[in-house]
Image (cartoon, rainbow, N blue to C red):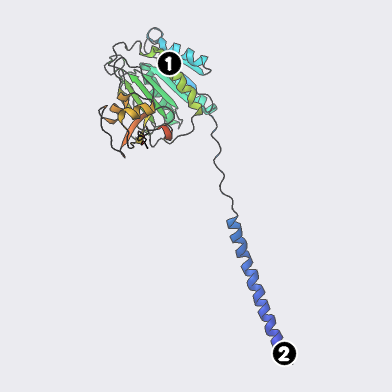
């Protein structure tokens, strides 16, 4: 009888131990299941277009007489539906404070466009905005004065269209060290038809500026680490095409300078200058070529020319 009681007691102890072990193991299983059931992170929300940019244009010295192209450009931008106002460069500090106050009140992309001393003013206002940590979406300087400062870090895109041999303008503006934005410089000194007092009146340049400003709000944030600065001496009698920077693309088997230019719809001379190569230079698969680009980089599928297909064998 005593032996049976001992057996019953021992069995009770074993059952108690087993039930405790099962209970202790249950939370671990729950944690594992919970860990497995954690849903994947949701995809990033789609890019929402930015508000329309606010555009500030600046005339040069004796602007109402010599910088009338700024007024014509402002009219075209206004007709396209943008807020565009023209100012004298002598009001630079005052307008700079307005630009900053307007952005703080309601953030919107800022575009600064200036001719001659107005180009210098565009950089001055960019420097003022940099002290307030305000980004400048686009700066376009048209034959700015020689005294124009360097492009500050808060400028996302800078384009300089100038005449290096100009006395009244001729500002070969560069960016400060560490600049990672988009940069393109166009020297038109070889074009005998262009001078300091008519360079800002080009209808073709006006058209491209309007198109560029129209695209700005629809361009999603881009990494600027791969943006390659462009510096061109534009051949005589060649229309300026406003690329904002360059991009490096790999050379594939069968590519030539001419086929790459055709695939990217850019003049052959731009590849030659960007890469310090002859227009008929032999390319090696694996090397990289700098190709000028607009606000958006070229599509990967169309970045390079396809190698020529092998002729079909006759049966």
Q: Residue at x 70, y 91 (%)?
A: 3
Check disc 2 and report the residue beneath it: 4
Residue at left offset 55%, top offset 32%:
48
Quarter placement of the N terminus? bottom right
Q: Nearer the viewer, residue 150 or 302?
A: 302
For residue 33, what is the image quadrant? bottom right
Neighbour class for label 1 at 10 Å: few (<14), some, many (≥20)?
some
Quick one: label 2 or label 1, which is nearer the N terminus? 2
Secondary element under disc 2, as helix, strand or loop, is helix
- Residue 92 lies, in percent from the top left, at 42, 19
Residue 21 appears anywhere in the view: yes
Q: Residue furthest top?
A: 65
Mark 2 in CB contact with mark 1 (< 8 angstroms): no
Query: Of 216 and 146, which appears nearest the observer?
Result: 216
Say above or below: 297 vs 74: below
Give me the disc on residue 206: 1
Furthest residue toward right: 1
Q: How many marks?
A: 2
Instruction: Give the percent coordinates (x, y) of residue 217.
Output: 50, 27
Q: Position of residue 61 (x, y in %)?
A: 36, 12
Residue at the image point whose x is 62% and y is 61% from the top: 30
Label 1 element class: helix
**Figure quadrant of residue 11:** bottom right
Q: Is residue 39 placed above or below 209 in the rendered structure? A: below
Looking at the image, which is closer to me, 99 or 174? 174
């Amino acid at each position: 009888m005593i032996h049976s009681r001992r057996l019953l007691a021992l069995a009770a102890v074993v059952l108690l131990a087993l039930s405790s072990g099962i209970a202790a193991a249950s939370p671990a299983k729950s944690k594992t299941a919970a860990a497995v059931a954690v849903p994947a992170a949701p995809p990033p929300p789609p890019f929402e277009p930015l508000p329309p940019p606010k555009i500030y244009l600046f005339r040069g010295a004796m602007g109402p007489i010599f910088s009338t192209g700024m007024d014509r450009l402002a009219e075209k931008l206004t007709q396209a539906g943008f807020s565009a106002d023209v100012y004298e460069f002598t009001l630079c500090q005052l307008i700079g404070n307005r630009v900053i106050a307007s952005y703080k009140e309601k953030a919107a992309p800022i575009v600064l466009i200036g001719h001659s001393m107005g180009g210098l003013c565009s950089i001055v206002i960019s420097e003022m905005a940099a002290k307030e940590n305000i980004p400048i979406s686009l700066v376009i300087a048209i034959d700015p004065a020689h005294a124009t400062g360097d492009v500050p870090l808060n400028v996302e895109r800078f384009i300089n269209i100038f005449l290096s041999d100009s006395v009244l303008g001729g500002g070969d503006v560069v960016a400060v060290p560490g600049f990672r934005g988009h940069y393109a410089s166009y020297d038109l000194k070889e074009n005998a038809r262009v001078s300091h007092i008519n360079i800002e009146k080009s209808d073709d340049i006006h058209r491209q500026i309007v198109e560029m400003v129209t695209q700005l709000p629809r361009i999603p944030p881009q990494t600027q680490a791969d943006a390659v600065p462009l510096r061109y001496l534009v051949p005589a009698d060649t229309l300026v095409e406003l690329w904002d920077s360059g991009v490096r693309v790999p050379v594939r088997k069968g590519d030539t300078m001419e086929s790459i230019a055709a695939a990217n719809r850019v003049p052959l001379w731009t590849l030659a200058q960007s890469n310090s190569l002859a227009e008929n230079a032999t390319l090696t698969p694996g090397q990289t070529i700098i190709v000028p680009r607009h606000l958006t980089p070229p599509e990967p599928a169309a970045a390079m020319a396809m190698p020529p297909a092998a002729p079909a064998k006759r049966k």
